[in-house]
Image (cartoon, rainbow, N blue to C red):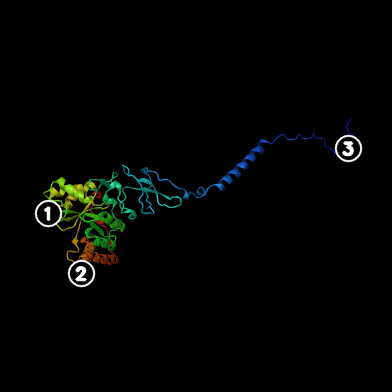
Amino acid sequence: MADISKDIERPLGQTIRPPRAASRGLSAGTVGATLAVLAVVGISGAIALRERPFRKPEEVAVSTPKVTAAPAAALVAEAAPKTETPPKETSPKTGGPQIIHVQTEEGDGPPKAAIVIRDPSTVGQNLKIAHIPDKALIEVSETGPLPMRAADGRRPFDVYARPWSGSRGARVAIVIGGLAVSQTGTQAAIAKLPAEVTLAFAPQGNSIGRWMQAARQSGHEIVMQVPLEPFDYPNVNPGRNTLTVVASPDENLKSLHWALSRTTNYTGVMNYMGARFSADSTAMGPFMAELGKRGLAYVDDGSSARSLAPDLALKDGVPFVAGDTSIDAVQERGAILKKLDELEATARAKGFAVGIGSAFDLTVDTVSSWVTEAKKRGIEIVPISAVAIDPQKG
């Protein structure tokens, strides 16, 4: 019999519901939500506790892989290294841009890295590393390093050229020769002469490698002088290993290679004397062909009107420069200044002029002061490569 008192106390219209059974476990949705929350908390904690390099990727050490050739369509840009330590690289056998990974700084902290994308056809060299030979441009020989074209077509004339503005205003190129003959004179010339002045080294000099580095670090473009037979030889003798008209082509090439191997990082050669040699096609022909093969320029000091150099240089693809005047044939300050002023007038008339001098103290001092004033008058002093006629560039 039902409990009548319970029925009376029950609210009107409601029936008694059976009691709900206790849950025997968590639902699938509750479990999934709980796991998601735990995962978020775990990841956040991992990030917070990671080491510093993860939060600052720019401090991550980057290894230096070997050079790899970039696709031809890659953008070409160049980032100069922050130190004078040259990047370690290998030269590709074909042309096209290269991607080079270099470590730019060393220290207690992690190394910093830079990426250089370089076009092998780019003319000129970073002056911070201009004293460091490009191994791709060196042929090892018995007498020393010989200049050569790189496998990708670059020439010493291009790579070791000093950069200039490229403008077509009045330009004057000055070459001062005889470097390395006198140690004190060489040191003074490198220190005093403006960086735009080109320096020519005598192969008979001493410590040429050291002076080359000093000159290039100071910003100078350099050329190598080669002794050629003058008239009245041997009474007038240019020095050791002079190239002569009676020597065989092989003998002259051997003498040429000796001069070329005395140092590196030069754009071309300049004659030392040589009025007779440069007028003889049999002697001069193989000489000029060798310069073309090696990617060097030829600077004719302009002392001989009979020189065959202009025609042979064009034939053999040799960049060519002819001097307009000797600026210090008379060792007197007024005479040197007059010659320099004549160079300025020539440059204003035809666009450029070339002066040739020697590393006498008076010449160095006079040229240094004149260059400072000439710049104020709007004359640009340029390296010798800037005024060369280059058959390979039309």
Mark 2 packing: few (<14 Cα in 10 Å), some, or many (20+)? Answer: few
- Residue 27 visible at all: yes
Q: Position of residue 100 (x, y in %)?
A: 37, 46
Residue type at numbered disc 2: Gly
Between discs 2 and 3, the one toward the N terminus: 3
Q: Position of residue 73 (x, y in %)?
A: 37, 44
Residue under pointer 3: 8
Between discs 1 and 3, the one toward the N terminus: 3
Q: In the rendered image, which quarter contains the N terminus?
A: top right
Residue under pointer 1: 276
Residue under pointer 2: 334
Secondary structure type for disc 3? helix
* Mark 2–mark 1 distance (CA, rounded to whole Å): 32 Å
Residue drawn at the location 27% of the way across and 50% of the way down: 156
Q: Position of residue 224 (x, y in %)?
A: 22, 54
Q: Nearer the viewer, residue 378 or 61?
A: 61
Secondary structure type for disc 1? loop
Q: Is residue 178 left or right of residue 7?
A: left
Q: Nearer the viewer, residue 121 or 280?
A: 280
Q: Position of residue 320 (x, y in %)?
A: 21, 53
Q: Nearer the viewer, residue 51 or 99?
A: 51
Please state which of the two labelled residues, at mark 1 or mark 3, is closer to the viewer.
Answer: 1
Mark 1 packing: few (<14 Cα in 10 Å), some, or many (20+)? Answer: many
Residue drawn at the location 70% of the way across and 35% of the way down: 25
Secondary structure type for disc 2? helix
The quadrant where residue 304 appears: bottom left
Asked whether the residues under the numbered discs 2 and 3 touch, taking CB atoms below 8 Å apart as contact, a structural biologist would say no
- Residue 314 visible at all: no
